[in-house]
Image (cartoon, rainbow, N blue to C red):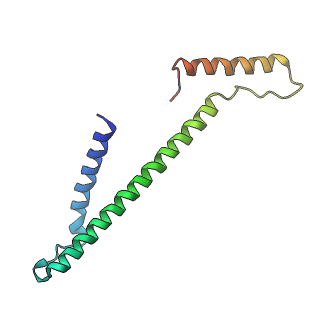
């Protein structure tokens, strides 16, 4: 299933949930027979404008989600590539060497596809 298919399925599920919630919220379909053609056109216009607003909000949410995913990936990479121990100036050279070797091995594993995600 592609991302688009998943998105369409999710939209369909949300629509079903909204239609189920409609009577519970007390929203009844009004009798439109008393409205003039002009009033009906105004209502349809307002619905179209609202739909476009919701689509724009959805697009903004999608972009925010994408940015969050990119930031998460960035910080996961920082964590994955962090040396295993602390290296301070003047510390034992074996400790610093092992930190560098561990970092090198971590980078090699990441390049080969051995990721912990």
Along the horizontal axis of the image, is 78 left or right of 32? right
- Choose top left, top right, bottom left or bottom right for residue 60: bottom left
Residue 37's spot in the image, x, y percent?
14, 78
- In depth, the one of 80 and 65 nearer the eye is 65
- Choose top left, top right, bottom left or bottom right for residue 84: top right
Q: Residue at x 15, y 82 (%)?
A: 35
- Choose top left, top right, bottom left or bottom right for residue 94: top right
- In depth, the one of 64 and 27 nearer the eye is 64
- In the image, residue 26 sits, relative to residue 7, either above or below, namely below
Residue 50's spot in the image, x, y percent?
32, 66
Q: Residue at x 18, y 79 (%)?
A: 38
Along the horizontal axis of the image, is 53 left or right of 23? right
- In the image, residue 1 sits, relative to residue 98, either above or below, namely below
Residue occupying the far left of the picture: 33
Residue 61's spot in the image, x, y percent?
43, 53
Q: Residue at x 20, y 74 (%)?
A: 41
Q: Which quarter of the rendering shows the N terminus?
A: top left
- In the image, residue 37 sits, relative to residue 105, either above or below, namely below
Residue 19's spot in the image, x, y percent?
21, 61
């Amino acid at each position: 299933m592609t991302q688009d298919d998943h998105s369409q399925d999710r939209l369909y599920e949300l629509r079903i949930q909204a239609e189920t919630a409609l009577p519970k919220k007390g929203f009844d379909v009004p009798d439109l027979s008393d409205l003039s053609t002009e009033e009906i056109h105004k209502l349809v216009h307002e619905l179209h404008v609202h739909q476009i607003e919701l689509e724009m909000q959805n697009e903004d949410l999608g972009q925010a989600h994408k940015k969050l995913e990119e930031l998460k990936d960035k910080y996961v990479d920082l964590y994955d590539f962090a040396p295993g121990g602390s290296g301070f100036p003047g510390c034992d050279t074996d400790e610093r060497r092992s930190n560098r070797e561990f970092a090198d091995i971590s980078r090699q594993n990441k390049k080969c596809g051995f990721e912990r995600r």
